């Protein structure tokens, strides 16, 4: 995720490193309060200190390394602070200014609105919007440190604000991790990945390359709107190769629908191919016995097609398998009957349901 850095006057940078750093614990999150600031963009003095890091030991190392890169030593009284290029002070997102600051695990600041988080979450965004500023530091905007990387947090916040983050070109892994974090912050995947949302279109754009993964993600969080169009990209997928682990993620409901889609289309194909071209009245040049040869040729060609066919068999494959039969016919009426029958099969196959 892109961030911009700005040189700032940090009034609290001169505080002694031995002074206690105030932290407020919240369920699943850690809160760091800001000091009195001359401008909103200036981060709190307690954030720069590595003392009492709220992350796990492994995350502490990552955070401290990241902080050392993003918060260099004071040079002429200025500090370089990484801030989100979308959620920054003065961003024209809403008509009122942000009132809470979220700090990602890689030390990127996101300036957001607690009212928006509260409206989207059923647990006050894991409790962070219920935190009050530390009175000892006279701050007005609380700063909350979360465990998510900025690339993940960026997707979560864009989803809450229903803003597209496609210009960041997030990977499917990042999108999947963001959706996986929704329950932690009391967010509904059904609402945030609904058909009309930007996150829905972003996830669907990955379906051609990651069809099974996108379908599993939709199935896991019961996002039917996403599972339906994604299922069409799985018509050529060999269902027998689905692992037990993936089957557990998808669940019985969506796995059954996917199997029924494959089986239903294969059954429909066989039913379409079964009837041979209709016979025409017997003539001296083409008797019923002659027309039986057309019936046998159709049966052989259609059986060959159905044997190797997949649920996504194309209309061109049908044309290639059955079309050459007419070249072997000397009767014009037989050729016309074959042409009409083949066109009927192709048209009917094109309207067979392609999604769950």
Image (cartoon, grey):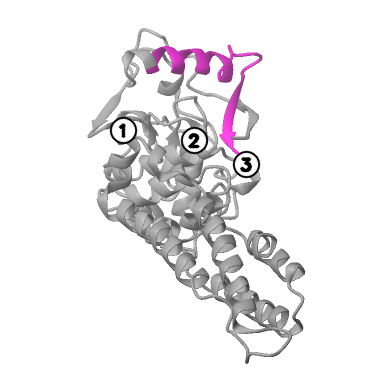
Given residues 153 and 275, the one toward you in this image is 275
Q: Quadrant of the N terminus?
A: top right
Q: Position of residue 18 (x, y in %)?
A: 36, 7
**Which image quarter: residue 133?**
top left
Judging by the rendered image, the residue that carries numbered circle 1 is 134
Query: At x 26% / y 29%, what residue is drawn?
Result: 24
Asked if the residue under mark 1 is in contact with the one under mark 2, i.e. CB atoms within 8 Å, the reply is: no
Residue at 66% in and 77% down: 338
Q: Viewed as shown, does residue 288 lie left or right of 173?
A: right
* Circles 3 and 1 in contact, beta carbons < 8 Å: no
Q: Which residues are magenta?
A: 59-84
Give the mark nearest the N terminus, 3 or 1: 1
Quickly name the residue at label 3: 169
Please say whether residue 204 is one of the residues in the magenta stretch.
no
Could you give the CA–CA distance between mark 2 and mark 3, rounded to whole angstroms? 12 Å
Classify mark 3: helix, strand or loop: loop
Is 2 on the left-hand or right-hand side of 218? right
Task: State the CA–CA distance, disc 2 to disc 1.
Answer: 37 Å
Q: Residues under labels 3 and 1: Cα distance? A: 37 Å
Q: Can residue 109 be seen from the camera position used here?
A: no
Q: Give the answer, above or below, for where 121 lies relative to 281.
A: above
Disc 2 element: helix
């Amino acid at each position: 995720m892109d961030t911009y850095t700005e040189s700032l006057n940090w009034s609290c940078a001169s505080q002694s490193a031995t002074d206690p750093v105030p932290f407020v614990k919240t369920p699943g999150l850690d809160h760091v309060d800001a000091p009195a600031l001359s401008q909103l963009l200036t981060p709190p003095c307690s954030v720069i200190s590595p003392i009492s890091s709220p992350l796990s030991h492994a995350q502490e190392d990552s955070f401290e390394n990241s902080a050392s890169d993003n918060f260099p030593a004071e040079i002429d009284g200025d500090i370089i602070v990484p801030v989100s290029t979308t959620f920054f002070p003065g961003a024209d997102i809403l008509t009122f200014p942000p009132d809470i600051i979220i700090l990602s695990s890689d030390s990127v600041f996101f300036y957001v609105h607690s009212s928006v988080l509260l409206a989207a979450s059923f647990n006050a965004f894991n409790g962070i919007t219920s935190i009050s500023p530390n009175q000892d530091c006279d701050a007005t905007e609380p700063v909350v440190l979360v465990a998510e990387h900025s690339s993940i947090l960026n997707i979560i916040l864009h989803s809450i604000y229903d803003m597209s983050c496609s210009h960041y070109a997030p990977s499917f892994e990042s999108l999947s991790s963001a959706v996986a974090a929704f329950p932690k912050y009391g967010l509904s995947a059904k609402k945030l990945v609904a058909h009309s949302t930007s996150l829905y279109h972003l996830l669907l754009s990955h379906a051609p390359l990651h069809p099974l993964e996108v379908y599993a993600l939709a199935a896991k969080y019961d996002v039917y709107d996403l599972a339906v169009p994604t299922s069409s990209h799985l018509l050529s997928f060999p269902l027998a190769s689905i692992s037990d682990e993936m089957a557990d993620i998808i669940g019985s409901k969506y796995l059954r629908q996917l199997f029924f889609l494959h089986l239903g289309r294969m059954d429909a194909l066989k039913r379409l191919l079964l009837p041979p071209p209709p016979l025409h009245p017997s003539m001296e040049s083409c008797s019923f016995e002659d027309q039986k040869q057309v019936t046998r040729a159709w049966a052989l060609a259609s059986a060959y097609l159905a044997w190797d066919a997949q649920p996504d068999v194309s209309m061109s494959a049908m044309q290639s398998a059955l079309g050459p039969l007419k070249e072997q016919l000397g009767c014009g009426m037989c050729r016309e009957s074959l042409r009409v029958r083949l066109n009927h099969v192709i048209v009917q196959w094109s309207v067979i349901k392609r999604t769950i």
